[in-house]
Image (tube, rainbow, N blue to C red):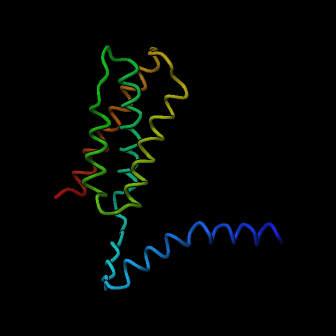
Amino acid sequence: MKAIRLAVALGLLLVAPALAQQAKESAGKEVPAAAPVEEKPAPYDERLERLSEILGAMHYLRNLCAEKAEDNWRASAQRIIDLEAGAEPRRKEKLTAAFNRGYRSFAAIYTACTDSAVVAEERYRNEGATLATEITARFGN
């Protein structure tokens, strides 16, 4: 019980200067509340997450097997994330996590370019192309 009280007291001591500064700064200002951005899931979000995951896998596999490093797949994923979820932090998080999951899933398995890595890259590239075509055909303007 004493440890909890001590932790609370220490926390208040650490936070008090920041709270006092905020109170001092905002005392003379009337700041309008920013309207929260409403995040609505798009009907193609699951497909978009899968595409982001594939782009992460492609980024890893291509650089593993390429003679010189390239950043095309990561840049493509970043463009998708910026365009689709620019003002929606939750969607941005999901798409970024999917990219990282795809990258890490192959980084955990392949440390050198092998025949199976080349086959996996080809399959993922085909799946990604199919997904991209499907998303734009069904949901594009």
Q: Nearer the viewer, residue 114 or 126?
A: 114
Q: Position of residue 32 (x, y in %)?
A: 30, 83
Q: Residue furthest left?
A: 141
Residue shown at 50% from the left, 34% from the top: 104
Q: Nearer the viewer, residue 52 or 9?
A: 9
Is residue 109 rendered to the left or right of residue 88? right
Q: Position of residue 125 (x, y in %)?
A: 33, 32
Residue shown at 44% from the left, 15% from the top: 113
Which image quarter holds the C terminus?
Answer: bottom left
Q: Quadrant of residue 77?
A: top left
Is residue 113 rendered to the left or right of residue 33? right
Q: Quadrant of residue 51?
A: top left
Reply above or below: 129 against 15.
Answer: above
Which image quarter holds the N terminus?
Answer: bottom right
Is residue 108 rendered to the left or right of residue 130? right
Reply above or below: 109 against 18.
Answer: above
Residue shown at 21% from the left, 51% from the top: 137
Q: Nearer the viewer, residue 114 or 75?
A: 75
Reply above or below: 90 against 51.
Answer: below
State how many labels appear.
Answer: 0
Residue shown at 51% from the left, 34% from the top: 105
Q: Position of residue 35 (x, y in %)?
A: 31, 78
Q: Position of residue 11 (x, y in %)?
A: 64, 67
